[in-house]
Image (cartoon, rainbow, N blue to C red):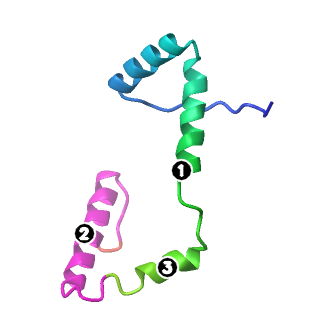
Amino acid sequence: MNKMVRKQFFITTDQNRRLKAHAAATGVSEAELVRAGIDLRIDQAPAAQDWRDGLDNLSGAWAERKDLNEEMQEIRRSWNRRSQILGRKTKRS
């Protein structure tokens, strides 16, 4: 058996209810159901591609956008607002 690693995570109230009901109905522990769900999800994921393939797919994705300058200014403003909320100094302040 593989060595177990402890993980903590949050699930919704509905997921908790359904998990408990399924565990009780099948006689399988909640932890085993979670592990099986993780395995199932990962096994169904497409095979990992080389990162260059993903980059090639993104190449030119925003080429048609005419508002990139405005978009980047808004993104930078949101970074500055977040920094100010957290009490950090920004380059522009």
Residue identified by numbered label 3: 55
The crowd level at tag 1 (other Cα within 10 Å; few <14, some 14-19, many 20+) is: few
Residue bounds of the magenta highlight: 62-90
Along the line of sight, the residue nearer the viewer: 67 or 45: 45
Residue identified by numbered label 1: 44
In whole angstroms, how far apart are the C-alphas of marks 2 and 3? 27 Å
In whole angstroms, how far apart are the C-alphas of marks 2 and 1? 39 Å
Residue identified by numbered label 2: 77
Image coordinates of residue 45 in percent, x first then y, are 53, 54
For residue 93, say whether it is visible: no
Q: Amino acid at mark 3?
A: Leu
Residue 49 sits above or below residue 15 on the image? below
Image-quadrant location for residue 68? bottom left
For residue 23, say whether it is visible: yes
Residue 64 located within the stretch drawn in magenta = yes
> N-terminal of the two: label 2 or label 1?
1
Image coordinates of residue 56 in percent, x first then y, are 48, 83
Residue 72 located within the stretch drawn in magenta = yes
User: Which SS class for mark 2?
Assistant: helix
On-image quarter of the N terminus: top right
